[in-house]
């Protein structure tokens, strides 16, 4: 973190994701960098998906929260390196599971969505007897699974 | 950037962005109409990705050409002949099989396209974007390939429908791999790869998937073209009137 950006970071670290409100942007690894130039803070974010509809909400949220403490901010999107589910913190993974979403596995190079470990654990009953129902779940970042033991459907966060 | 380079980059970005916008719009037409709930989630998700790609590319294009203030102007306020997308992406969806087959053709092409851009593009912002776009188009290609196999290798009826889809889309595939003066210039300047240079990788993958689904690989010769020059098919006018309705009826409206 660049010197003089601590105040901004203090505010931003608690902002939550609009689609996964139990996770902070920090848990997700979306905020990559905060820098300062003469007039502004420049906040670099890595979108989880290029077309993620939450991105504009996140940008507005960051700008308005910083404005409240008198900081004017420019938000920049970065695609390189592309956001990876490996950037989700341990704490974030734990919270995901508590909320009923199976967290992503570590990622193989250059693949998307295909877990390195084939086993996906049911966040309800912890059984590994699960199957994929659809490549796409309620949002672009999740796919849909079902548990063959407790029969409950659940979202699995894709590994990206 | 020198002005002739800027013109090249602008036009190149438009071609890719328009392909993505128009296929994104077509894909979004499935919202609420897909055969199962899972597909009703999958197709709009893919549409969002495609439109997201278009949006980012239009933003880059606006940075280069000050004639356009923002990405919405490029997406919603151009006339029909100013769109440079392929005829393939503007055709009506047809049935579900036709829709996933076209998505498979296109996303497999884009996957190899971005893979090349990632290595050899001289325009840094596009090169960075391609890293992410490559991952997303790979995912679309895999999703669509599974349906092509499932339906091709399904019942007699589903196989027949897929064979019809192959015949239906065949005339539009030549344009996907057609080099022209512009693509040659892009390639000479290390901006974008030539479409023909992607053909072998594309063909190997598509052929293998069609074979798995007991389907025949189509003949790929240049039949219908014009999209890259702004000469579109009848279906495109209807698509645009739908796509542009809000901005035409309520100029500068925003969410």
Image: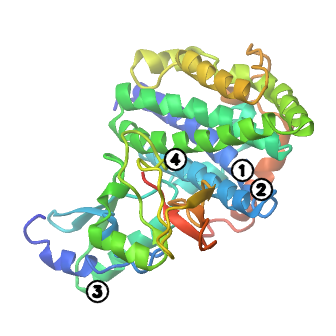
Residue in front for this viewpoint, B190 or A84: A84
Q: Are marks 4 and 1 in contact (CB under 8 Å)?
A: no
On whether disc 4 and disc 1 are found on a single subunit, the reply is yes
Query: Closer to the N terminus: mark 4 or mark 2?
Result: 2
Where is residue A133? Give x, y as percent: 64, 58
In the displayed structure, B155 sits above or below A3; it is above
Query: Closer to the N terminus: mark 4 or mark 1?
Result: 1
Where is residue A73? Give x, y as percent: 28, 70
Disc 4 chain ID? B
On whether disc 2 and disc 3 are found on a single subunit, the reply is no
Dot 3: within a 10 Å radius of its alpha carbon, few (fewer than 14), some, or many (20 or more) residues? few
Left or right of B104, for residue B53: left
* Residue labelled with disc 2: B30
The span from disc 4 to disc 2 (Cα, nearest Å) is 24 Å
In the displayed structure, B167 sits above or below B54; it is above
Q: Quadrant of residue B101?
A: top right
Query: Does dot 2 land on a helix, a strand or a loop?
Result: loop
Left or right of A31, for residue B72: right
Disc 2 chain ID? B
* Residue labelled with disc 1: B27
């Amino acid at each position: 973190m660049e010197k003089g950006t601590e105040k901004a970071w203090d505010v931003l670290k608690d902002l939550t994701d609009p689609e996964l409100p139990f996770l902070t942007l920090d848990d997700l690894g979306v905020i990559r960098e905060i820098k300062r130039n003469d007039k502004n803070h420049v906040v670099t974010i890595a979108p989880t998906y290029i077309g993620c509809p939450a991105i504009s909400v996140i940008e507005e949220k960051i700008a308005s929260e910083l404005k409240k403490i008198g900081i004017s901010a420019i938000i920049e999107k970065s695609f390189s390196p592309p956001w990876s589910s490996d950037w989700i913190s341990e704490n974030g993974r734990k919270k995901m599971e508590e909320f009923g979403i199976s967290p992503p596995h570590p990622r193989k190079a250059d693949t998307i969505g295909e877990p390195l470990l084939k086993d996906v654990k049911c966040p309800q009953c912890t059984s590994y007897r699960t199957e994929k129902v659809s490549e796409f779940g309620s949002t672009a970042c999740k796919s849909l699974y079902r548990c063959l033991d407790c029969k409950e459907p659940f979202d699995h966060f894709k590994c990206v | 950037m020198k002005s002739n380079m800027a013109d090249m980059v602008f036009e190149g970005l438009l071609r890719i962005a328009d392909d993505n916008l128009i296929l994104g719009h077509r894909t979004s037409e499935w919202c609420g109409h897909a055969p199962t709930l899972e597909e009703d989630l999958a197709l709009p998700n893919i549409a969002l990705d495609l439109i997201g790609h278009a949006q980012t590319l239009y933003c880059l294009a606006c940075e280069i050409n000050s004639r356009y203030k923002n990405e919405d102007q490029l997406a919603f306020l151009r006339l029909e002949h100013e769109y440079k997308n392929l005829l393939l992406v503007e055709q009506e969806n047809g049935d579900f099989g036709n829709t996933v087959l076209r998505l498979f053709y296109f996303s497999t092409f884009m996957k190899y396209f971005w893979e090349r851009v990632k290595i050899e593009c001289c325009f840094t912002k596009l090169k960075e974007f391609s890293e992410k776009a490559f991952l997303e188009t790979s995912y679309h290609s895999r999703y669509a390939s599974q349906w092509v196999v499932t339906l091709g290798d399904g019942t007699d009826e589903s196989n027949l429908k897929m064979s019809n889809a192959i015949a239906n889309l065949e005339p539009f595939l030549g344009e996907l791999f057609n080099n022209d003066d512009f693509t040659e210039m892009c390639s000479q300047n290390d901006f974008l790869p030539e479409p023909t240079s992607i053909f072998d990788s594309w063909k190997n993958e598509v052929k293998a998937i069609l074979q798995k689904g007991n389907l025949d690989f189509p003949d790929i010769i240049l039949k219908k073209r014009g999209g890259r020059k702004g000469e579109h098919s009848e279906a495109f006018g209807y698509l645009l009137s739908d796509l542009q309705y809000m901005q035409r009826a309520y100029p500068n409206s925003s969410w």
